[in-house]
Amino acid sequence: MGRGRGPGRWVARAIVTAYLVLLVAWPLWLVAQHTIADGLDGLRGIVDDPDVVHALRLTVVVAVVSVVLNTVFGVGISLLVVRYAFPGKRLLNALLDVPLSVSPIVVGLALVLVYGGRSGWFGPALESAGLQVIFSTPGIILATTFVALPLVIREVVPVLEEIGTEQEQAAQSLGATAAQTFRRITLPAIRWGVTYGVVLSLARSLGEFGAVKVVSGNVLGETRTATLVVEEKYLNFDQGGAYATAFLLALVAVACIVVVSIIRPKEGPR
Amino acid sequence: MSSVRLTRGSGLGLGVALLWFSLLVLIPLAAVVATAAAGGWDGFWQAVTNEQTAAAIRLTVGTALLVTVVNVVMGTLIAWVLVRDRFPGQRALEVLIDVPFALPTIVAGLVLLSLYGPDSPLGLDVANTRAAVFLAFLFVTLPFVVRTVQPVLAELDREVEEAAASLGASRLATFRRIILPALAPAIAAGAALSFARGVSEYGSLVLLSGNLPLRTEVTSVRILSSIENDNLGNAAAVATVLLAISFAVIVALDVIQRRVGRRG
């Protein structure tokens, strides 16, 4: 089964390549082609459309806020889960992965049931205090943060487990404060893990669709995000606009993946 | 590695983190189950066994299972080729594996439509059929088995395989007796993730499957139409079924990982 032996290797290579080309590469290429075939008019068209520009700006703001929230929370909870012993740790560990396997529509529904202004658990109280969550930007941020929550944690926890605590203990025994230890020892060690987590969260946050659709109300020029623009334009027979917006989103997503694949050191013996 | 007890500072940190996690994830998910329960067992059962909803659940679970089987075979093969083979263009394949993970789901639907829709250059038009649901699930679940099997395969000790081969074991026997048992937990974990992702999929189907009642409508779409009809009780009941499936997958994963942990 080693490398360089027999025809099986070529067959496997061919099957895998064909499968990935048919499932991912070719369709992706066709979308790029559709966009460029319009002579970039489609792209110019969306950049000139104030509603689309607003949607793009909203998407970026929401993604940045939720990435910041998830990075702070993710690094903090990873440190706590890896370094400390407390009751219920195993349960918490399992629960932290929950957002990955919950349907985006269910995420939206869950947030509406709690933060909805009319009949939510906390919604009416928050609204009388002047904070509208659902059908407004805070709701979009919550939904986006929910779906991307485990990504930083999943990258940081294995790194923390691997580096151990010796250096941190040494620093502390030499009189470093907790903050100094974190900034000088821990943070540099988990730097790359955090970076991958941030890039993946960014890609996921820019592209969230289902959960945002439920909580945003999809109001033109107010709570419509970029992914909602793709749907709306396609369904309204503005295929050029849909392809152009989709192309932009796909470009960012692929760029994120390429960045991660370049900076991620090769694992395992190669 | 030894864990230490909570200090005052870390205890406070844990409290803040748990509060945020509860407000964002736990309380909202509890609200779904509580809302479903408020309708009583009869209400729940009626919502779930409604002809259209039951058809959607059957289609979703059935297709997700089928896709998971394909992923177990193709994902393992892809991981194998990526770890054990070297050829030009391999790096590009690595990137392609992760694309479905980062691509917005609505864009994924549009992307698939360009090759498998009405204007397909291959003459393959699956739009608005059940095959479209299968295709969409296959696309969005692509990374899971590959990415869980790959690191385990890379760590696998080649010497054991060589020893088996030198003792006269056929390639097939080596694969079945040595490699497959070592990979099984990773394959199972990837399969569980892929199944959970498939069952919960929504975005990639919007433009691709047409959401035809009783034919190509999946569970998430049913929940969304209940929400849009302002029938939150009904939506919560169906959502609870999906949550139960995710929960079962998470428990299964935990068990698998524990077993692997013991072995390592």
Image: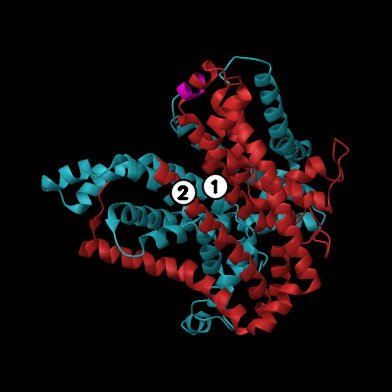
Disc 1 marks which amino acid? Ala
- Mark 2: which secondary structure? helix
Q: How is the image coloured?
A: by chain
Residue B77, can we see it?
Answer: yes
Magenta stretch, overall SS: helix
Mark 2 belongs to chain: B
Residue A194 in view: no
- Farthest residue in the left direction? A174
Q: Colour of chain B?
A: red
Query: Is residue B130 rendered magenta in the image?
Result: no
Start-end of magenta stretch:
B158-162
| B65 lies left or right of B193 | right
Kind of residue sitting beneath label 2: Gln
On residue B189, the disc is 1
Q: In the image as oriented, which residue stretches furthest toward the front?
A: B167
> Could you tell me which secondary element the residue under label 1 belongs to?
helix
